[in-house]
Amino acid sequence: MLVAVSQGLPAAGGVYAGGESVSLGLNELSGQMKAMPDFALVDQFGRSFTRDSILGHDAIVAAFHTTCRESCPIYTGLFLQLRRELPASVLLVEATTDPWTDTPQVLRDYAGRIGASWTFLTGDPAALSEFWKPFDVELSTGDVHRSTLAVIDAHGYIRSYYLGTPDVGGQLAPELAQLLNDDGEQLLRSHGSGWGLPQVLDSLRTIGGLRQPGSGDQGPAPDFALFTLDGRSVSLSDFRGRPVVINFWATYCMPCRREMPMLQRVANAHPTMVLLLIDERDDRGAATSFAKDLDISATVLFDSDGKVGDLYQVGGLPTTVFVRSDGSIEGRYLGETNEQILGPHLSPPSAPEQPAFRWVVINRQERLAYVPGLALLLAWFAYTRLYFFLHPRRLTFDPSFFMYLTGKPDPTCGLTRTFAWAWRGDLGQAVHVYPLGPFLFVIAVAVVAYLGIAVIIGRRLSFHVPRRIWLPVVVVSVLALAANWTAKLIWLGM
């Protein structure tokens, strides 16, 4: 093992394990290879992107800008090919040479139009000049600039250069082909400079960049809580015990629009699976219209500041994360998915292992909805607690409206007095007046406590009780009330 030390501490990206890696480290650390300099740029979401963001990942970096009409759309076409071939551990980065035009918003719109699920970089002109200096690339706003692609290893060293225009097979996606001018179309037809996907893959293979990460080493999925488009609070932990598919998307992302109906169909076909659609840094009104237009019934969450996307290291849209029922990440996919891609992550569907009851967070609107019920029960408690004080003064409501109409007691006749006796602690009298009274009194106290927790603390119970359990409970409860009423009628001679 070889460890690079800087200022008395292990250097970032400076650990080499194994004979071959140690030999590589000696070459890199001795200056035989050029290192990426420190830099400070921002991605299309406005997030900071530095040299530390690359360390630990093999990366492919290319120069481009959004107004280039010759080689740049072809480079982006190559990146579309690479994204389909490469594991998610390999970073794809297109950095602009025109920071005056390419703001984060412009880059985000560009990525959405072409379906790019990788990182686009921009920044201050001086910072970008320093970034491109090792590659001899100068900032440019025109179609003519130094076309460059570089392969960077996980330690931050430049391992391969490609100059000129890549060969993408003479074809581009329509949204890219329409960006080409006449010279760009000629470059596309002439197959560029003779290098393309196979050569870049060979370069990555040489430095180990095509290793597939293990399926069991991605750790637990970070928990989060977001609001739905209608204001409900939903957290990932609400669905513990069920497999979850998290899809990060945005309304400006064309591949997101194409794949969304398919995701809904897959969710409908896998009822044990939970589909969470997280809208990234978007407009709430546009997101609501988007979901309505596509008839999406899955849970749509709004990540307005992108913090959850940052938590999951989302570098482009769409990004899909697969979470096992135990809460660990099973895998992720960058780019537009299809049923063939989703299939291995969903089969066989696992049955949910959920607790029957679970506390979940509720928002202010939901808390206010519990206030009328709580107020009504508290008023009932106050009335029954003062019943023996109010009754001699003819301030009680006896008999009930049902008895006025029929001349017979209703099913709850005696409930007020049984609660009054229960407040006094005389359970014998409470049972005599209404056999189920003490039991219902305990239930009422529990309901008041529950509603108080919901209103004051902002938590409610989520129930997952099978029908085979709750249906018999309901039937027995109805029969018990009927038997109680019948006994009351017989006892009164009615």
Image (cartoon, helix red, strand yellow):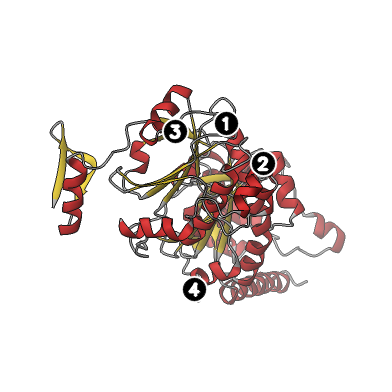
Looking at marks 1 and 2 on the same chain, the residue that comes earlier in the sequence is marked by 1
Q: Mark 1 points at which residue?
A: 102
Give the x, y percent position of residue 22: 16, 52
Q: Name the residue under label 4.
A: 350
Q: Mark 3 points at which residue?
A: 137
Which residue of the protein is positioned furthest toward the top in this rendering?
Answer: 126
Q: Which of 243 and 357 is in front in this view?
A: 243
Q: Mark 2 points at which residue?
A: 390
Q: Which of 254 and 174 is in front in this view?
A: 174
Label 1 with label 2: CB-CB less than 8 Å: no
Q: What element carries label 1?
A: loop
Looking at marks 3 and 1 on the same chain, the residue that comes earlier in the sequence is marked by 1
Instruction: Give the residue displayed 61% in from the left and 66% down from the top.
Output: 267
Which residue of the protein is positioned furthest toward the right in this rendering?
Answer: 405
Give the x, y percent position of residue 363: 58, 42
Q: Distance between the residues labelled 1 and 2?
A: 77 Å
**Is residue 206 at least partly visible in the picture?**
yes
Task: Select label 3 or label 4 by which is in front.
Answer: 3
Q: Which mark is residue 440?
A: none
Instruction: Give the residue displayed 67% in from the left and 39% down from the top.
Output: 284
